[in-house]
Amino acid sequence: MIGTSLCRWAISYFAVAIAWLLLAEVLIVAGFGFPNHDIGGPDTLVIVHLISIGWLSTVLCGALFQFVPVLAARSLYAERWTLPALALLTLGLTVLLAGFLGLGGHISGPPWLLPVGAGLLIAGFTLVVANLGMTLWSARPLPGPARFVAGGLACICVTAAFGGMFSLVLSGTGVGAQWPDLLVSGVPIHAIAGLGGWLTFTAMGVSYRLLAMFMLAPDGDVRLGRLAWLAGIIALAIGLVGGVLALWRMTGLNLALLLAAAAALLSLAAYGRDVLGLYRTRKRRALELNTRMSFVALASLVAAAILGAAFVATGSFPSHVGALVFLVAFGWLTGLVLANLYKIVPFLTWLETYGPVMGRVPTPRVQDLVAERRALKWFVLFFAGSWAATLMLLIEAPLGFRVAVAVVMVATLGLSEEFIRARRLADVAEPLRLPTGAAAPHLLISRN
Amino acid sequence: MTEFIDVDVRPILRAGGEPFSIIMAALERLVPGEGLRLYAPFKPVPLFDVMARRGFAHREAELEGGEWEIRFMPNDGSVEAAEPTSAALSDGDWPEPVLHLDNRDLDPPEPMVRILAALERLAPGQTLCALLSREPVFLFRELTKRGHHWRGGFTSQKDAYQLTVRVRE
């Protein structure tokens, strides 16, 4: 191990991602897409892809470029691929969204926008997967958390492949016309692979290491996370392979999804047990805000799992799928990401600014870069807004949903300001702020 | 020939207990000239410093399964100086560490800060040894930039990372 350096563009990924999140929130508050419009309609697809690709995938890629080298104890395979990947993802999403807007009749665009956007996105994700995949490949046998990431990388390939095929079908091209039924039965697979495999499974893996690190909990046991990983992989394999087989045979999709859901619940239960175990064996008694907020996000995941199982049992799953997806995307994934950004951004800024002079002159602690009390109110607003919005979807109150998302948006803006303040070292007391030899960091790029 | 009192802290550590007070209590009971033989599930590096200050030199031997037998002897000239320690063997040409840090229970990134600060106080060529709760991946980058050399690895119990840094000459 020759040591991990700062990924130059990780902060840029975070900034682009937050911009996409804010745009999505503005559109929801303005009443664009579900629940005012059809859940499968083009307007909803704009929102869904803004959040899943623009926000969650971009922020996750940035975090993985920084932390996969830490998980795998290897340098990133090709740092120089990270900026082109960001450019491809951003451009691809922009073109894809234009395609959806054209599909919804908001703009008059050529039909090739969707496949071209999808192609650019696939190219971007290919660069990401190849870069992270090669890094992991060189670190075999993989430690536990890195295996989750490997599973997640496989799932983004499945998600992107289905997305690419959908774009051909939706654009009305001759190639797409060969698979008329693909959209109906393929969407669950696309969504499970994306939301469940790529985003949730990867986040679970990374959180094992981050939670252990931030709570000072021992995570050396090789059995830690094994059951959660195994059950999760089985769930994804049944869901994806079974789903594709069902598509091909035109039958049995529901059975595959039900079996996958059972394995997924087992995986989540094992994950919950592991996280509680880390919590109990932690050496740090008073937890920092980022860790406490990660647990709140985790509570959303637990709630989503329980609600989902209850809806399946009562047969009301299809009418509540929108609320569930919102709870997973905001309460769990967005909450977890924002909570961890609240640690990652100050930490990377601290390392970049004070690393070169550490030990030679007095330097601030990482915690001196943040003001937890101020940020706590934004997190409270964020989670309260996310849960209220989920509730409004469940009781079918579209206006209440928009008001709740407005609260989430205010919280997002507040937290964005906290991240900017951390980058600008705005909360560091003056004599320590910029000691001799230290240079102020750039807002959007890290020196490495 | 030194007489030894045996203290086995392996069961205490396995049960999650704190062995330090027991070692110190055993030390109080030693008669002049007596030594202490310690059995531990890992190399108790931080203890070496404490014992040296109390006038004990040590000899270490790795047992099967990554466990260690350490003999602490009163430093009254009775210690045979010729016998090389295994630490010296494993660290080859590097001098014995002048400083031992136990950073296992510190909040990250405090371990890194303390190691970098301690290195500033050492003379060129001197070494320090630190125990950490995990591999300090972000520290390596600073050590490289500053031209220091380091050797490190997980203890055989996999519960700590032992790092030795040699200051740039």
Image (spheres, coloured by chain):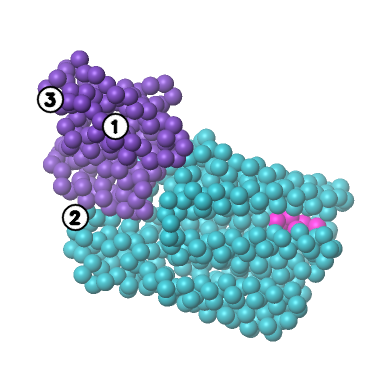
Chain colours: A cyan, B purple
Judged by depth in the image, the label closer to the viewer, 2 or 1, is 1
The residue at the point 28 percent across, 67 percent down is A440
Name the residue that disc number 3 marks.
B76
Position of A205 compared to B119: left or right?
A: right
Give, as a three-letter code, the residue at label 1.
Answer: Ala
The N terminus of chain A: image quadrant = top left
Q: Is residue B5 magenta?
A: no
Q: Is residue B95 above or below residue A151?
A: above
Residue at horizontal 22%, vertical 56%? Answer: A357
Q: Nearer the viewer, mark 3 or mark 2?
A: 3
Q: Are marks 2 and 1 on the same chain?
A: no
- Can you tell which mark lies on residue A360? 2
Pinpoint residue B162: horizontal percent, then vertical percent.
33, 37
- Say which amino acid is labelled 2: Arg
Q: Residues within 10 Å of mark 3 (few under 14, many from 20)?
A: few
Chain letter of disc 1 in the image: B
Horizontal and vertical percent position of residue B18: 38, 41
Pointer 1 or 3: first along the chain:
1
Q: Nearer the viewer, mark 1 or mark 3?
A: 1
Residue A197: give x, y in percent of width and height. 65, 52
Task: Locate residue B128 relative to residue A96 in the image: left or right.
Answer: left
**Dot 2 surroundings within 10 Å: few (below 14), some, or many (20 or more)?**
some
Which numbered circle lies on residue B26? 1
The range drawn in magenta is: A185-192
Task: Tell me which amino acid carries mark 3.
Answer: Asp
